Amino acid sequence: MISVVSTRAPQHRYAEIRREINLTHTAICLTLVAAIVSLGGIAQSLLENVAEHRWGVGLGQAIFLAIVAFLIYGGLVYQMARRGHLRRLLDHQPAGEKELHRFFHRHHAPAVTVLVPSYKEDPQVVRRTPCRGALQTIRIAGS
């Protein structure tokens, strides 16, 4: 039996990802425009209150301005992460059959990293972790 593995995403999937990337770019632009308008209005109101020596109202608006700025920042971080994920999906090429066979049927064990918990851990747990990592067995296909 011969199986054929495509190295490119199907055309409809490619178009769908491109559409999502364009929507994300639009969302980023709209967020930036809304951020400039809203933060500018709040900052202008804050400056007016400070100029009139209304410190209590000014402090409240400064706190509100900081909260809104952090929320907008969080939204932009999400949108940029989404854009990066979609770009990686677009550029992804699945491994070919030969490469998968070579990876899963190699004759030597891969290197292993053992993370040892050490912050506020019981000393016995810290001592046992490297031992348990060293005693792990790895099944190699074909052996």
Image: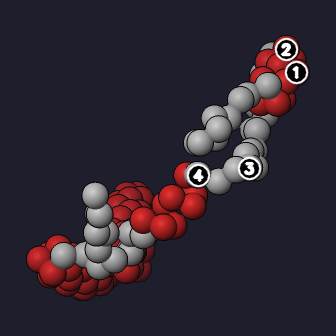
Residue in view at x 49 percent, y 60 percent: 100
Toward the viewer: 87 or 92? Answer: 92
**Given this view, does label 1 or label 3 mark the residue nearer the observer?**
3
Mark pair 4, 1: CA separation: 33 Å
Toward the viewer: 19 or 107? Answer: 107
Instruction: Tell me which amino acid carries mark 2.
Output: Gln
Image colouring = secondary structure
Is label 3 in contact with label 4 (beta carbons under 8 Å)?
no
Residue 13 versus residue 67 in the image, above or below: below
Disc nearer the start of the sequence (1/3) = 3
Toward the viewer: 93 or 54? Answer: 93
Local secondary structure at mark 1: helix
Is label 4 in contact with label 1 (beta carbons under 8 Å)?
no
| Residue topped by disc 1 | 127
Residue in view at x 82 percent, y 30 percent: 134
Which numbered circle lies on residue 16? Answer: none
Which of the 4 quarters of the picture holds residue 103? bottom right
Local secondary structure at mark 4: loop
| Residue topped by disc 3 | 108
| Residue topped by disc 2 | 124
For the N terminus, which image quadrant? bottom left
Mark pair 3, 2: CA separation: 32 Å
Mark pair 1, 2: CA separation: 5 Å
Which of the 4 quarters of the picture holds residue 53? bottom left
Q: Position of residue 138 (x, y in %)?
A: 68, 35
Is label 1 in contact with label 2 (beta carbons under 8 Å)?
yes
Which numbered circle lies on residue 105? Answer: 4
Mark pair 1, 3: CA separation: 27 Å
Instruction: Tell me which amino acid carries mark 4.
Output: His
Residue 127 versus residue 47 in the image, above or below: above
Disc nearer the start of the sequence (4/2) = 4
